[in-house]
Amino acid sequence: MASQGNRHGQTLRNHLEAMRDPLRRRCWVVLHDHGIASPKEIADALGEPLDKVSYHVKRLALLGCAEFVNERPVRGVTVQHFYRAIEPVLIDGDDWNQLVVEEPDLANHLLAHFMHAQRDDFTRSVKAGVLGADEEWHVTRSPGTVDQRGLEDALELAEETRRRFIEIVQRSAERRDRSGEEAINMSACLSFFKTPAR
């Protein structure tokens, strides 16, 4: 039986493998965002060829980052396979420290990618007239000054909020899978980080 440390190390290696390829990383993000999706839906969302997306979704499943959920016939001929992300697009503190030491360029790239993705979501929503068109949105920037305990409390709050949001997405995907209700795309970004002294 593998030790906890070995399993943790393998999970990190799988996460890094999932994120190394730009298209596979984008597929993982879309799959995570949608809760449950077929390679066709992911390909449509990304504007990428279906065969390439299908390859990467299957690779994500082999890496333990996604799992097959079910299949449905489409127009009575084609069968679409549906997957769900089972690992969040996340690297925890210990993994991040290891990544910074072993692959600093990838670490910097991922930081920039995560923030660019959030900015792009915001910009697209504003340009499309979605964000601000009704009262169903929330954007907050809350700078503050804290002590070490306050920083730790804030980081715990961020993790709790992230976990609760993932649960909401998963429950919504399960309800939509049963009801056929139309999906509502949304983006959530919660950032807690230290800033330089002014």
Image (cartoon, rainbow, N blue to C red):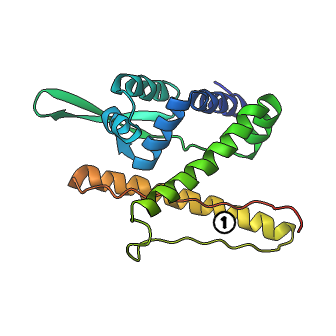
Residue at the image point whose x is 36% and y is 27% from the top: 49
- The image quarter in which residue 110 lies: top right
Label 1 SS: helix
> In the rendering, at what x and y percent does residue 106 appear?
71, 33
Q: Nearer the viewer, residue 110 or 164?
A: 110
Residue 150 as seen in the image, left or right of residue 49: right
On the rendered image, what quadrant is the C terminus found in? bottom right
- The image quarter in which residue 191 lies: bottom right
- The image quarter in which residue 94 lies: top right
Vertically, is 28 above or below 152?
Answer: above
Question: What residue type is disc 1 on?
Answer: Leu
> In the rendering, at what x and y percent does residue 5 appear?
72, 32
In the displayed image of the protein, which residue is found farthest to the bottom? 135
The local crowd at label 1, few if under 14, some if 14 to 19, many if 20 or more residues have their Cα within 10 Å, is some
Residue at the image point whose x is 67% and y is 34% from the top: 8
Residue 9 as seen in the image, left or right of residue 139: right
On the rendered image, what quadrant is the N terminus found in? top right
In the displayed image of the protein, which residue is found farthest to the left? 76
Disc 1 designates what residue? 157
Residue at the image point whose x is 36% and y is 22% from the top: 51
> In the rendering, at what x and y percent does residue 91 appear?
66, 42
Does any portion of residue 91 appear in the rendered image? Answer: no
In the displayed image of the protein, which residue is found farthest to the front? 127
Residue 69 as seen in the image, left or right of residue 148: left
Residue at the image point whose x is 57% and y is 27% from the top: 21
Vertically, is 91 above or below 63?
Answer: below
> In the rendering, at what x and y percent does residue 140 appear?
60, 72
